[in-house]
Image (cartoon, rainbow, N blue to C red):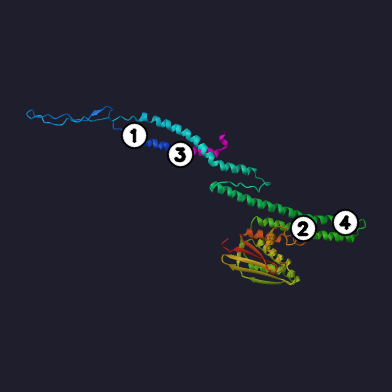
Amino acid sequence: MRLGKHPLRLRLTLLYCLVSVTSSTVLLVIMWALGKSLDLGVPPDFVDQVAPPSPMPADLPEPDLPRPLPTPRVAVPQIDVGADLVQPLVALAILAVLSLFLGWFIAGRVLRPVLTMTGRLHQISDRNVHERLALPGRRTELKDLADTVDGLLGRLEAALDAHKRFVANAAHELRTPLTVERALLEEPLIDPSASLETFRSNFARLLVISEQRGQLLESLLTLAGSEHGRGADDPVDLADLAVSTLRERAPDADRRGLRVGIDLEPVRVPGDPVLLGRLLVNLCDNAIHYNVPGGTVEVGVHRRPGRVVLSVANTGEVIPPDQVDRLFEPFQRLHRTADTTHHGLGLSIVRAIATAHDATLTARARPGGGLEIEVAFPLLGRA
């Protein structure tokens, strides 16, 4: 048995031995002091305790007295403290050795669940992250620790699954334009009669695809950056930011015949102006793009107790309530149809930016169609 492999067990053993020996030593010192106080210095011989008889007058008659009682004798032993300490010291040495073995055994029993958890954790990898410690027994400190580790493994499993889905969806989104680009480049090379006009047409389409791919990469970078937290922490007026965003998106709303309603209360929140601007742009773009002709878009900023709520609602297709949360996952749309201008990252970026600003995001499907999204930010000075 190598002690170097069990430093904590060895420490607990030494601690148990130290406590046992210390308590026994204190008890021995008390007994020694008590024995020393009882040492009266009287020799161990029996000592007569009767005084000599007093003389009697000769002319007095002999009294008729009862026979005298036997003379009491008291034995007071001399206490040899040095000799009496030998046996307790030997017992103390034996106790120290026994406490080492007993402490090693008890420490092993106490640390056995820790060794079990360590062994199971060594067996868990990215391929079997679904496994759990599942430590049996009643609730103790170690049981709470095992349950906490199981919760951490659950969150890690969810994060890994989301990462795998993200990589798969990103590969799919990038593979489609690459396939189209390859076809456009090969078409004039395969056709020997291809004209200059064909080259121009294909190159124009390649430019559009390249621009769309650049937008996708920019969105991916924004998503990755917002998930790492916000940069600046400046006071930002959400009402002013909403007005400027809607002004930029007004031509798109007019082309679709949408009515835009605003109800804005001037209020500031702490945050990164660039990221908050991107959040508003994505919310407004989503409300305008996924709408019906002649529909409405409603944007509001209101102060509530301890919070500032930004709300964006629109009309549109009827969304099943169980599909709302899925829309905030990367590359997810209500319908998996080809969309050359939107990649399904807008709401994912919104959620990441809201999380970076300690905001609470809620979304619900409207009964008549469309979506209502609320982002509740902490007030300035309470973040």
Choose top left, top right, bottom left or bottom right for residue 302.
bottom right
Q: Closer to the observer: label 4 or label 1?
A: 1
Picture layout, residue 103 above or below residue 295: above
- Residue 35 circle label: 1
Which residue is situated farthest in the top direction here? 45
Counting residues from the start of the chain, the first of labels 2 and 1 encountered is: 1
Q: Is the Cβ of the residue at disc 3 closer than 8 Å to that at disc 2? A: no
Going by the numbered disc 3, the residue's amino acid type is Val
The residue singled out by tag 4 in the image is 187
Task: Using the numbered discs, state the Cα–Cα distance from disc 2 to disc 1 in whole angstroms.
Answer: 95 Å
Q: Which residue is mark 2?
A: 213
The segment highlighted magenta reads 1-21
Q: In the structure shown, which secondary structural element does the residue marked by tag 2 occupy?
A: helix
Tag 1 and tag 3, C-beta contact below 8 Å: no
Earlier-in-chain disc, 4 versus 3: 3
* Residue 356, quarter of the rendered image: bottom right
Mark 3 or mark 2, which is nearer to you? Answer: 3
Q: Give left or right: position of 185 versus 118.
A: right
Residue 10 to residue 52: above or below: below
Inter-mark Cα distance, 3 to 2: 71 Å
Q: Nearer the viewer, residue 305 or 145?
A: 145
For numbered disc 4, what is the local secondary structure? helix
Q: Which residue is mark 3?
A: 19
Are dots 2 and 1 in contact, CB under 8 Å? no
Q: CA distance from mark 2 to mark 4?
A: 21 Å
